[in-house]
Image: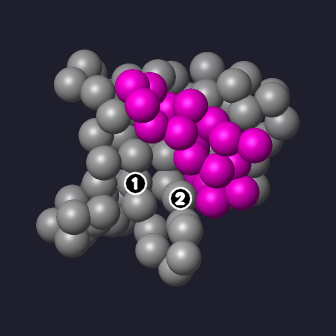
């Protein structure tokens, strides 16, 4: 099963290790450091030019990718079938 993140981006539900609300999860220093490092390493994919509402962290083939989406974490959870994903933070 796949989860549509916006535009033409869909990720395998099995690859998702976390869905994070951008407003509440970016307060932590370690979270900001993680996002900054991922951006420097080219592992951040912006799904939209709109204001970001969530970050979806995926691991596929040993590579971590952070998708920044304009879709809220609540909506993404509903699209995923309403069941919490492993490691999800809403």
Q: Are marks 1 and 2 in contact (CB under 8 Å)?
A: yes
Write down the residue under mark 2.
58
Q: Please provide the residue range marked out in magenta.
A: 1-27
Q: Is residue 67 visible?
A: yes
Question: Residue 71 appears at what percent x and percent y?
Answer: 47, 22
Question: What colour scheme governs how the chains and residues are painted in the rendered image of this protein?
Answer: one colour
The residue lying toward the viewer, choosing from 88 and 46, is 46
Q: Residue at x 39, y 25 (%)?
A: 7
Q: Is residue 56 above or below residue 58?
A: above
- Height in image: 18 above or below 74? below
The answer for how far apart the CA atoms under marks 1 and 2 are is 6 Å
**Total labels drawn:** 2
Earlier along the polypeptide chain: callout 1 or callout 2? 2
User: In the rendering, at what x and y percent does residue 64 appear?
Assistant: 45, 68
* Residue at point 30%, 63% (across, down): 43
Q: Residue at x 41, y 60 (%)?
A: 65
Give the quadrant of residue 40.
Answer: bottom left
Does 65 appear above or below 4? below
Q: Secondary structure at mark 1?
A: strand
According to the picture, the residue beneath numbered tag 1 turns out to be 66
Q: Tell me if 82 is positioned left or right of 74 in this view.
A: right
Instruction: Quadrant for residue 34, please give it.
Output: bottom left
Outermost residue toward the bottom?
62
Picture residue at 29% right of the left edge, 54% below the top: 44
């Amino acid at each position: 099963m796949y989860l549509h993140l916006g535009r033409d981006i869909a990720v395998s539900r099995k690859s998702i290790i976390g869905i994070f609300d951008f407003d509440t999860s970016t307060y932590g220093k370690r979270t900001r450091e993680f996002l900054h490092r991922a951006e420097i390493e080219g592992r951040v994919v912006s799904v939209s030019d709109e204001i970001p509402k969530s970050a979806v962290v995926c691991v596929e083939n040993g590579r971590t990718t952070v998708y920044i989406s304009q879709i809220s974490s609540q909506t993404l959870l509903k699209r995923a079938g309403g069941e919490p994903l492993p490691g999800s933070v809403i």
